[in-house]
Image: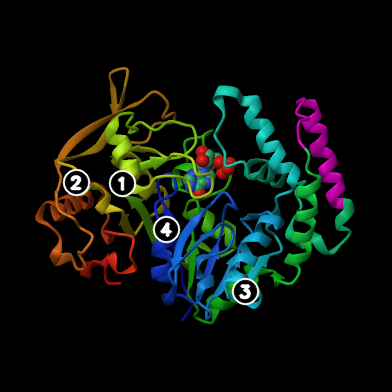
Amino acid sequence: MKGKVDALLGIVFGDEGKGKVVDYFTPRYDVVARFAGGPNAGHTIIFDGKKFVLRAIPSGIFDESKLNVIGNGCVIAPDLFMAEAQELETAGYALTERLHISRRAHLILPTHRVLDRAYEAAKGKAKVGTTGKGIGPTYSDKAARIGLRVGDIFENFAAKYEALKARHLQILSDLHFTDFDISEEEREWMAGVEYMKKFPLTDTETELNELLAQGKNILAEGAQGSLLDIDHGTYPFVSSSSTTSGGVCTGLGVPPSSIGRVYGVFKAYSTRVGSGPFPVELFDETGDRIREIGHEYGAVTGRNRRCGWIDLVALKYAIMINGVTDLVMMKSDVLDTFDTIRVCVAYEKDGIRTDTMPYDTEGWTAVCEDRSGWREPLGAVREENQFPPAFKAYVDYLERELSTPISIVSVGPDREATIIRPSAGL
Ligand code: IMP
């Protein structure tokens, strides 16, 4: 029997805590593959008591028996990749044979990062609030058919690099953005290119399909979130890749018929980093309290995450776009001490109310309903039958509203605090 590709996706604005679930899921799969994004992602994983922040490298890397793949839909910065990989090597993980990188993945040049800053500066107040890792400019070059791919590093690379860099420098000069010096960064970047050569840089698309034919199963590990998807997110305040389930097929080269379950990961509340519409945002002490208890500070940038109540409009939309089969609710315990928990059920603007995602989410306010809190610590709960009644009622309510089962509930940072509900059949 052929294998399947299951997708594990953050379905709101990223930072849903996928790192922890992916670690939980890894033993069930033969391969863990990243299909979109690049070092803008930051998956925090605690392994053997040590904390790692993975950016480009899939989370299956901690399990010696797994193959890890950086797919063609990803973008990769050789210098940052080298730093990330070397940290793992220093911690004792042998990576080389277990980490395959698609020759079709695109390279993030140092000048892409400068362009990222320059475009943001030029946008002024309308800036996206990017992670500054060069993501947008790299995907722009990919779409413009002038980008450099991993496979390019073996042939006449210096000339190709200089040509693209010259083009970038011209744009920067046209933008009068001249306050930068990449010489140091460039040396590290070139060292990173050499370092990458020790990894299998392959046609991962063919490899993955061969593995599927042999009955092997693949976990496609999402990055960012569905509302940051270049097509389906809150454009233009989005990232530049396809972060939704459709991106799994294009970003790995696997057919739609190979997709099995789609796990949609969300938090019991909402967060967003960077600019852009966020109707549920709380500007008061409740927002501060959620940030504080949930430690909502960026893994890559350290920025304060914007916090708000759970948003059913956004979740319904993301479930629809992704075809989510199973929901995974993270960080439920963050709301333990709240008497009342609010739930956004619709958006409102100029007297118009909608419960479907509007074209332009700017200027809409959240219409919320109150639910009673459970007011009990969930951290020690290990089985569904230990759920406090008010928490069980909340989970049931969300399932009904979202018409999708919540198969997994996480109630704390520990591995054991991940409860697989018997009804999930997992
Ligand atoms: P970029 O991906 O660096 O271009 O940033 C575009 C937008 O996506 C910004 O609002 C970022 O804050 C956001 N973003 C990018 N990666 C992540 C992530 O891994 N988690 C949350 N937000 C992200």
Q: Please name whichever residue, 262 or 119, is drawn nearer the observer in this view of the structure.
A: 119
Query: What's under tag 3, amino acid-wise?
Result: Leu
At horizontal 44% and vertical 60% (from top left) the residue drawn is 19
Distance from Cα at disc 2 to Cα at disc 3: 43 Å
> Which numbered disc, 1 or 4, marks the residue closer to the eye?
1
SS of the residue under disc 2: loop
Would the CB of label 1 be found within 8 Å of ligand 1? no
Q: Please name whichever residue, 294 or 172, is drawn nearer the observer in this view of the structure.
A: 294
Query: What's under tag 2, amino acid-wise?
Result: Thr
Q: Earlier in the sequence, mark 2 or mark 3?
A: 3
Distance from Cα at disc 3 to Cα at disc 1: 35 Å
Q: Earlier in the sequence, mark 1 or mark 4?
A: 4
Q: Quadrant of the C terminus?
A: bottom left
Q: Which mark is residue 225?
A: none
Query: What's under tag 4, amino acid-wise?
Result: Lys
- Mark 3 lies on residue: 95
Q: Which residues are magenta?
A: 160-180
Left or right of 89, for residue 179: right
Distance from Cα at disc 2 to Cα at disc 4: 24 Å
Q: Earlier in the sequence, mark 3 or mark 1?
A: 3
Q: Please name whichever residue, 133 or 345, is drawn nearer the observer in this view of the structure.
A: 133
> Which numbered disc, 3 or 4, marks the residue closer to the eye?
3
Query: What's under tag 1, amino acid-wise?
Result: Ile
Would the CB of label 3 be found within 8 Å of ligand 1? no
- Mark 1 lies on residue: 293
Distance from Cα at disc 2 to Cα at disc 1: 10 Å
Quarter-wise, where is residue 85 in the image? bottom right
What secondary structure do most residues of the magenta stretch adopt?
helix
